[in-house]
Image (cartoon, rainbow, N blue to C red):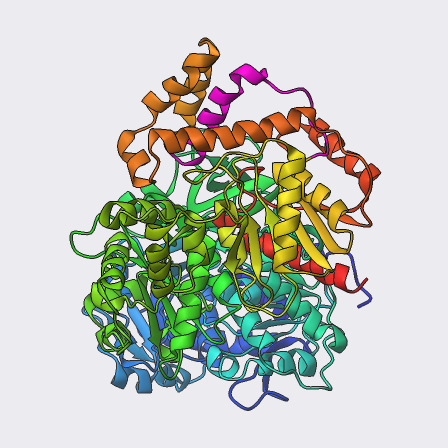
Amino acid sequence: MRHTAPTKVPHATLLSHLLTRAAAGDPARGVRFCLGDDVPAGAFHSYAALHDQASHLLAALRARGCAPGAPVALLLEGPDDFVPAFWACVLGGMPVCPLPPPRADPRHRAGPGPVAALLEHPVVVTTRALRERLPTPPGARVVDLGELRAHPRGDAPTGLADRPVRPDDTAVLMPTSGSTGGPKAVRLTHANLLAATRARVHALGLHGGDVALNWVTHDHVVALEIHLLALALGVSQVLTDPRTVLPDPARLLRLVDAHRVSLTSIPNSLLGALNRTPPHRRLDLSCLRRVLSGGEANAVGTGTAFLDRLAPHGLDPGALWPAYGMTETCAGVLFNGRFPGGDLGRDFAAVGHPVPGVSVRVTDDAGAVLPAGGTGELQLRGPVISPGYLGDPAATSAAFTADGWLRTGDVARVDDGRVLLVGRRKDTVIVNGVNHHSQEIEAVLAELVPGEVAAFPTRERGGDTERLVIAVATATRDDALLTAVRDAVTAHWGFAPALVLPLPADAFPRTGSGKLQRSLMRERLEAGAYDEHRAAVEVPPRRGGSRGPREAALVGIVADLLARDPATVDAGDNFFDLGGTSLQVLRLKHLIGRATGAQVPASAIFAAPTLRDLAGRLADSTATAPRYDPVVTLQPTGDGPPLFAVHPAGGDVLSFAGLAQHFAGDRPFCALQARGLEAGEEPFRSLAEMVDTYVGAIRRRQPRGPYVILGYSFGALVAFEIAKALEDVAFLGVIDQPPALPPPLVDAEHDRGLCALFLTWGLDLVTDEEADELLEELVELPPEKQLAHVMRIAPAHRLAELDLTPGQFIAWTEVMHVANTFLRDYRPTGRVRSMTVFHVEPPSGAAQWLRHLRRWDAHGADRYVKVPGNHFQVLAPAHSRTFHRLLRAELVRAAAG
């Protein structure tokens, strides 16, 4: 479009000034109502005509005793009914309360009572059809819109209450969902709404050539946001509704094309629906330059797919602007105009910078303001912020800090000046004290589930922790889909959902703006509304059962460990499919040994496809000690060349367990385990012996290349040496490890104590604070006493749970100490054909680490890829999905040559 500079909005002090000024402008500009199948044309009303309709309705309201300052509730379904009635109230100085329109689902027909009761005997404007369907709120006076329209026309009322209305008076009372108790009505003043509108025009670069489109119901503040932006600019707008758009999402794009729309809003869920909907081949979206996307977390993958899918239709690659706002902020106050380029490598997009006049800060639980990069509660301040809730001083007080900042309840951090949402405090599942955000879980599962998916918590009566429920939309029971969902959650977050619940597509309630109502789904689950669907999946299918006492014992052990009904566990099940985690492998080892006397290595549990196979290995282990084999197959399926992953200094394969599951169906994932971790094994004597052993094991598994090798931390150096020995290597990746380290922090004699401390911390046997204190104690002790001191500190019951006797703990420490010894003397030589170096963002002040990493240049590194997390958490459940995506992209690039 020709105009690029934002238009300066003429000053206004009351909302009524926006309509009055637009009505005096270009008669070709106004509102076009496109409802149902009437997409191409719609019914057009100039702003002058809209002003006339509103004035007529105001006269009718006044004739029925409605006075300035008295709130009026609007219970109207279509925008063609709502908008004229809204402006009648604004012109008359009457605060407007948009009530949620009823939904087709009979479970949602509670009527307007709960919200209307807040207004104390209000006038409720509705239609005859709605009045017959819904109960009348107690104490309310119901007025029929048809009767208002039939009011005799006379002289328009004079002095339309502009004079007695002040900027700080309430203009709109916007209902909220009531997630913290009963419903509330947010007070939005004339000054709030006008300040927000002016700030958005500037932040979004809007101008007089724009055309706006809104499809959201008017009980949501986003509808008001788009409507007022168009009026402030004096430009035309297209108004439709969810009943027109949601059954056929492509209709929204056809509206954009037909009416040359340049500004609209589309939440992440609708972006996903559009990605699954074939667009019309003749669609022209070159007019669309601002797509505001808020209300829920914006998955980077969903947004980039939307842009890529519609690029052939002329969509601007920078059109999608992730946004953040609340009802209390008059909708959007943070916008990200750098998507997608500024968000590559993230799971969720940043919400960007605040609009002019709005300040942002992040605080910890004690209220202290955090520096950039700190994660805490997002708080906002500025002229756009609501003064509070109607008639609810307690809720108002709770919503603000003592120094006047709005507490959003959202968890965020500020990176490079941009706000990045981490999650919603109320949209979290707290399992065993760890927060897991619903949006992150849903984003992962969206790649598996073709329809709706919802993640929310539940707590059984008397339960000591919340449990995760995953609801998926499916017309019929799909056991393969339910299993895939369970597997994905277990792989990403290290625990299994308590329930994977198939529901019909209409059982996923959303607000008028499309936001998923997870708390309502939890209420329904716990009230028994989903019992029929739940019973269908909780009845165990008939399966093969257990063959013999060893299988039966193992089934009982696993059921007890995973807190499952033994009737739901079968000898044909896989431990990880049932919800087992990598750390629970150690606990399972302990329980098996205690119950059967068999000493089964952890590698056998990873490698056994089913409990039946594991029972067979138990029989073998009681007869002969297992022979050391470094290759542990963590994920056996797929036709691609196996990926061989080399362990960190600890020597175990636990860190790769989550990453391996992402390769299911793609390629086998084989991890290499160091010698010395199992009973009767001695650690390697040299790095050369380790490399030779691993090369031989890899060739036994895959006799010929090309090979795919990955090394993590210390394993990066081993992987480099393996790649040189194998020669025919298609891909070599190293994770956050330079080819040569700076001088160690401690001498070789003190290293065992440091290794023991690191192992204790890595297994969550001590907290971060306890580890810091323990380090200070260790440096004061002679080397021969350090290991014993750590062993005394580590909780004995936790060591037992992890099957770590003092001897086994010492053996694990020795494996790590030996690896550190190899590191001290290692100096890399030679080159490989190609290498990708994956690295994390170093902590502040550690830029020297990046310089050390760049030394791989001399040995064949030609790609450096930044990955999320820190050195110790780069493969943790929270980051494994993103790491897999980046790793797989490098594998595809390498395969293409």
Residue ranking furthest to the front: 623
Pick whichever, 542 or 622, lies toward us.
622
Q: Is residue 679 left or right of residue 109?
A: right
Q: Is residue 704 above or below residue 835?
A: below
Indicate the position of residue 26 as horizontal and vertical percent values. 70, 73
Q: What number of labels is visible?
A: 0
Q: Considering depth in this image, is 697 or 56 the residue closer to the camera?
A: 697
Q: Can residue 420 be seen in the rendering of this structure?
A: yes
Q: Is residue 9 visible?
A: no
Taking 123 as reference, is 764 above or below it?
above
In the rendered image, which quarter contains the N terminus? bottom right
Quadrant the C terminus occupies: bottom right
Position of 268 with respect to 769 (left or right) is: right
Residue 564 placement (x, y as % from top left): 25, 60
Tell me the magenta residue range: 738-764
* Quadrant assignment, res 860: top right
At horizontal 43% and vertical 64% (from top left) the residue drawn is 609
Q: Which image quadrant is residue 849 in?
A: top right
Q: Is residue 192 positioned above or below 16 on the image? A: above
Horizontal and vertical percent position of residue 794? 34, 27
- Residue 819 percent across, percent down from the top left: 58, 31
- Please state which of residues 626 and 549 is positioned toward the viewer in this rendering: 626
For the point 59% across and 65% down, the residue is 302
Q: Residue furthest left?
A: 462
Q: Residue furthest bottom?
A: 37
User: What residue is shown at x 49% (from left), y 26% (from top)?
Assistant: 755
Q: Is residue 758 magenta?
A: yes
Is residue 74 inside the magenta stretch?
Answer: no
Left or right: 888 as drawn, with respect to 681: right
**Looking at the image, is 686 positioned above or below residue 496?**
above
